Image (cartoon, rainbow, N blue to C red):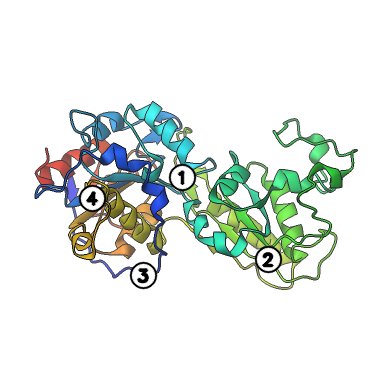
Amino acid sequence: MRFLTVFRVSPTRNWPPLSSFQLRSSWRFFSQLRSSPDRSSFGIAFDIDGVILRGRVPIGGSPQALRRLYGDSGNLKIPFLFLTNGGGIPESRRASELSELLGVKILPSQVVQGHTPFKSLLKRFENELIVVTGKGEPALVMSEYGFKKVLSLDEYAAYFDNIDPVSQYKTWTTKQAFNHHSNSKDLFPRYNVFSDRVKATFVVSDPVDWGRDIQVLCDILRSGGGLPMQNNGQQPPLYFAADDLEYQAAFPAERLGMGAFRIALENIFNRIHHSALVYKSFGKPNSFVFKNAETVLRQIKASCHDDNGVGNEEMASLDFKTLYMIGDNPPVDIKGARQAGDPWFPILTRTGVFRGKENHAEFPADLVVDTVEEAVEYILSKEGNA
């Protein structure tokens, strides 16, 4: 293992407070963790793709590594969460999948996905018509966050015959396959795109049909959220859950991510529209993502108390001396942890995007290891929990 000390900068602390309801289900699971002098003074954030899993296959000894964070009774001993730019399904379902694949109990509160911060926009768009796209079930994700008027891009496109000029050449079908010969206005009586403007668009996860999605998003954005035949409106807000150019999937070589889709959309939009595309990207390496992760880990740690709450003085005692970020993508995981500053300690694995012999030149980690199992071994040995 190689060790390298780096300088950090102070984080931007602008993340909104996390609501308490997200951790109610965690209370019983963590109830056997009691306030005690030896309670963990550190926490761990794991990236998933390229660190814990490759596709749906555990890698790097991840099941064995995670089991070491639990006590003999199966209760969590070391606070940890998954901090991933991936997504497309609700956090509750992702937690269930991870539990099954890794053989440990993972709670929804331990899963922070790229689109999880979209919850912070609920007050602004709760009752407004929004269009969402991405793999998985992006409309379900946003609906579970509390947004009331959600259309997937599949559903939106179904209102307009021939909006995708090459659809006849596509052999695949989706769950949102509709009869274009029927009255489109009757398909979705709650959302009438012919009278309601689209107030925001969200790229929740990696889009499946790039060509169709770029075309339809350009239509919506150029029209100001009105009918796609128009071209005279102010662009509605556009949000991306993450901005990864590449990520490690099941294929041996890296695959293009949401950041690549954003580059394609932005370049095309700027060529066909008089104003440049305006957007906001969430996910790592943004510092507020790491600040939010710290808040979640503190709340997980706080849930070990027997009383009905934690006072200000007790909450101060829940601060972590060290928070470890274990990732495989230097421009995303390592850069983000370094920008967040203390108490973050970035660890780089060689099981995903990064495979170099030495540390990454531009975004060096504090530690470089071969696998996540080695990273956990280092942490537990350093913290005296081996």
Q: Earlier in the sequence, mark 4 or mark 3?
A: 3
Gap in Å between the C-alphas at discs 2 and 4? 46 Å
Identify the residue at image location x=74%, y=68%. Answer: 273
The residue at which mark 3 appears reads as: 12
Locate residue 348, reporting x and y percent: 29, 48
30 or 292, which is in the foreground? 30
Does the CB distance between marks 2 and 1 fall below 8 Å?
A: no
**Residue 154 sits in quarter:** top right
Look at the numbered disc 4 and give the secondary structure of its residue.
loop
Q: Earlier in the sequence, mark 3 or mark 1?
A: 3
Give the number of the disc on residue 247.
Answer: 1
Q: Nearer the viewer, mark 2 or mark 4?
A: 4
Crowd band around label 4 with a 10 angstrom C-alpha radius: few (<14), some (14–19), many (20+): few
Q: Nearer the viewer, mark 2 or mark 1?
A: 2
Locate residue 297, reporting x and y percent: 29, 51
Locate residue 25, reporting x and y percent: 38, 41
Q: Nearer the viewer, mark 1 or mark 4?
A: 4
The residue at which mark 4 appears reads as: 307
97 or 28, which is in the foreground? 28
Q: Amino acid at mark 4?
A: Asp
Gap in Å between the C-alphas at discs 4 and 3? 32 Å
Does the CB distance between marks 2 and 3 fall below 8 Å?
A: no
Q: Is residue 330 above or below residue 49?
A: below
Q: Amino acid at mark 1?
A: Tyr
Does the CB distance between marks 3 and 1 fall below 8 Å?
A: no
Q: Amino acid at mark 3?
A: Thr
The residue at which mark 2 appears reads as: 236
